[in-house]
Amino acid sequence: MFHLDLKRDPSLIFVVGFDVTRRDTLETCDSIIMMIRKKLQEYFEKSGVRPYVMVVVGNKIDLADKREVTREFAQEHFASMDPPLEYFETSAKTGEGVNKLFESIIRMYIKMKSPQPNPGARNAEDECSSSDEDSSSSSKRCIIV
């Protein structure tokens, strides 16, 4: 079904998605999250603790009339996990929420990689802004070197 090789990349980012129009995909998403966390636990026990970013994405929000999983239910569901997971919603068809998702992942990754703030460093929040709100404006862009 799904193979996870943790020996290759010490910088781990997981984006686990499901279809909001099919409740059964939420259950599959839960199984994948549990499997990833189990593999991570096994890996961390052998190699030492390393931080990672994991988020959940409900997709196909453009199909509101076919929706089986509400935003509220999904937010509560993933917030109740231990540890809680951040939940996002997107539409691959319209692009709604996609920029916000990836900009948030970048912020989480930067925060994870730099645990001690540097007073002279710029904040990732200052360098990135969501272009979902107004795509016609000249929004800031993320540059990661």
Image (cartoon, helix red, strand yellow):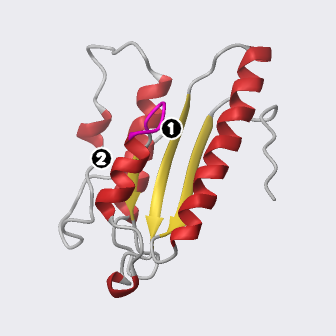
Q: Position of residue 81 (x, y in %)?
A: 47, 38
For residue 63, the mark is none
Q: Which residues are magenta?
A: 80-84
Element carrying mark 2? loop
Graded by Cα atoms within 10 Å as few (under 14), some (14 to 19) or many (20 or more), the crowding at tag 1 reads few
The structure residue drawn at horizontal position 38% and vertical position 84%, both measured from the top left corner, is 63
Horizontal arrangement in the rendering, residue 10 relative to residue 91 (left or right) = right
Residue 67 drawn above or below residue 10: below
Compare residues 115 and 47 and report the one nearer the observer. 47
Horizontal arrangement in the rendering, residue 95 relative to residue 47 (left or right) = left
Q: Position of residue 145 (x, y in %)?
A: 50, 38
The structure residue drawn at horizontal position 43% and vertical position 54%, both measured from the top left corner, is 102
> Which one is earlier in the sequence, the residue at label 2 or at label 1?
2
Q: Amino acid at mark 1?
A: Val
For residue 145, the mark is 1
Instruction: Tell me the residue that label 2 is attached to.
Output: 128
Graded by Cα atoms within 10 Å as few (under 14), some (14 to 19) or many (20 or more), the crowding at tag 2 reads some
Horizontal arrangement in the rendering, residue 80 relative to residue 52 (left or right) = left
Q: Is residue 82 magenta?
A: yes
Measure the C-alpha gap from mark 2 to mark 1: 14 Å
Q: Is residue 42 shown to the viewer in this render? A: yes
